[in-house]
Image: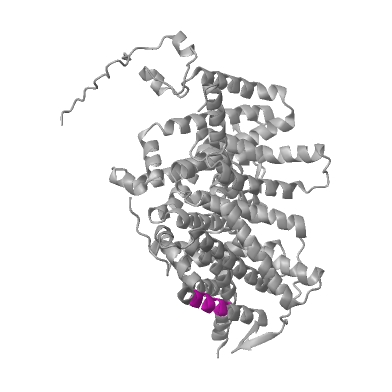
Amino acid sequence: MCSAVAVKPTPGAPTRPQRRASWWESLRPRIGCGVYHSTYADDMALRTTTASRLRLVLVSVTAVMFPFVAGDYWVGEANRLYIAIIGALGLNILVGFTGQISIAQGAFMAVGGYTTAIMTVTLGLPFWLSLPCAGLTTAAIGAIFGVPSLRLKGLYLLIATLAAQVIVEWLILRMVWLTKGPNGIYGIKPPAFGPLEFSDRRAFYFLMLFFVVIAILFAANLFRTKIGRAFVAIRDQDIAASVAGVDVFKYKLLAFGVSSFYVGTAGALQAHDRLIVSPEYFNISVSIEYLGMIIIGGLGSISGAIYGAAFIRLLPTALSLMTGTLGLAGTNVGVLQQAVFGLAIVGFLIFEPHGIAKIWRDVKDYFKLWPFSY
Amino acid sequence: MSQETVLFLQLVISGVAIGSIYALVALGFVLIYKSTDVLNMAQGEMLMIGAWISYSLIADYRIPFVPAFFMTLAFTSLLGLAVERAALRPLIGQPIISVIMVTIGLSIFLRAMVIAIWGTQYQRYPSPIQDSVVSVGPVPIPEVYLWSLLVCLLLVGALTLGFRFTRMGIAMRAVADDQQAALSVGISVRRVFALAWVISALVSAIGGMLLANIQGVGIGLSAVGLKALPVSIVGGLDSIPGAIVGGILIGVLENLSAGYLDTPLGGGVREVAPYVFLVVVLLIKPYGLFGKERIERV
């Protein structure tokens, strides 16, 4: 075998020389299906088409302008949505990208929430220290509960993580000296960096926006690195991955760690949003809710985690608005919400297993190829 | 006998009794998993629906217990059929997380439906089994537990014989072993799947009625699904005797740990002990005590 492989251009095909794209070229609308990358810069870009860049600008402007236009209630909802997005991203890294099913999301959020609560309230430490500590503690605990994944797969791993959920919940209830047991810890302060306080809902909004952007960028780039590729290889076929030289156990633990870091951070931010942590915020229905988010949004997709979190977070509000306008005021919204949530999970799995992310992609493709769709 | 031994025996015997109920529920998990490779997380809800239907038939429609019992079985087997046809069949061949999530989605939906129909109130189950207490050695045991042990043994016997000697039972085992091979010898895999869900629904309805005797009928009944999950895993998800052994093992373990460790550890050990035990068993034997090991090929 020769070491240098020369690619012979197919006769007749236009050659594509390496060159830098000038700025106007990057703005030029691309016609036809597929995306042709003619430069390395193009190939490395997260956004490759003009339309997607335009959408990014639109979304960013909307996100920044939102708190100036929306009322208090909606800003609060958005804050909760952003926290959910961070949590769902974390879970999707583990379940959607690495293929390790976990139902311990609630427990990991609890570890993050309680870490920051204990550090700021009991020990009086500042937020900027407690937040990364919450993430790191959760990452460590997540990695510990990831150890069974060495031997367990699929169903059996799911049950092992269920055990993690039950055990952590029990510890929180019983370690009263540390966690105050069923009462929970209250009096958590809003985030503050020295004199800079985020006690106002709108100020808090921008802090959350900042964290969400970091979380999304990190996740999007993670799957372009060696580590991220190893995660995906393990999901697709772990035996094949190990044959190809991926240290399966190491990367599984790493996936548990990275995912739990996200989840713990989400739990900590949630604690600073609600200003209280107590066991019922972190029970198994939280785990199921987050699993529902990534299923509905799209497994193994960054944008899927965002859509799914939005779907689940906005569902109660949408339902109560709908029952209000339809004149069904007597309906038990909680029950209706549960029923719709259950049906949505079942429906998506049957009719669109790749979730909202796939639906969105189909819609885009339809318009991109119109009128010659095939 | 010293007081210590009496306490010990008491814990063990009542543990066996509780364990027999767990075993019954775990049997529902095993029956479905064995032939269809699906872990039905909605088992607890199906059990609760069985209990509620029989409650309605007896208390609201004034039907005597025995016909009500059979009508309940008919209703729940229809439910099992419907669930299999509507939710599980489209997912044949999908990754395991989809299949599990569909049953979790179902469990949420079914629970919401139960609340919408019957509310969240607990009701006393109108049962033909008396509240009397039978003493086994030095230990008084409520009669219900003996019934559940009896029913459990009967069902396991019937299922074991059925799997071994009937045509359909052999077909079910064949499907469990290899779906492709079963298809190629002319077994209708679809019918086997439907049958597995019906049998499992029947078993869990019976379990629901027995459990309702103990706890009353209410939304909390479905929680036994989560309790029986470690049982079926410890025993091995594809082993019928495993469900029985696991059930009794976990029942006894729960009682012993609650009896001896609750005071030093501050209570609630009953909830967590089965899961700790589960993790230990899984780390040593990843397919449970009696489960069949799967060999994976790339």
Splitting the image into 4 quarters, where does residue B227 fall? Answer: bottom right
Q: A208 and A222: which one is in front?
A: A222
Q: Is residue A75 left or right of residue A258?
A: right
Numbered-mark total: 0
Q: Residue A180 lies in magenta, yes or no?
A: no
Q: Is residue B38 above or below residue B69?
A: above
Q: Is residue B289 left or right of residue A278?
A: left
Find the magenta span and give its range. B152-162
Q: B196 and B156: which one is in front?
A: B196
Q: Residue at x 70, y 46 (%)?
A: A337
Residue B87 in percent (x, y) is at: 59, 52
Residue B270 showing in the rendered view: no
Q: Residue B158 lies in magenta, yes or no?
A: yes
Q: Magenta stretch mostly in which secondary structure? A: helix
Q: Residue at x 60, y 78 (%)?
A: B151
Most extreme residue toward the left is: A1
Q: Is residue A131 above or below residue B258?
A: above
Residue B1 in percent (x, y) is at: 55, 91
Q: A120 and B161: which one is in front?
A: B161
Q: A218 and A46: which one is in front?
A: A46
Q: Is residue A72 above or below residue A263?
A: above
- The figure's colour scheme reads one colour
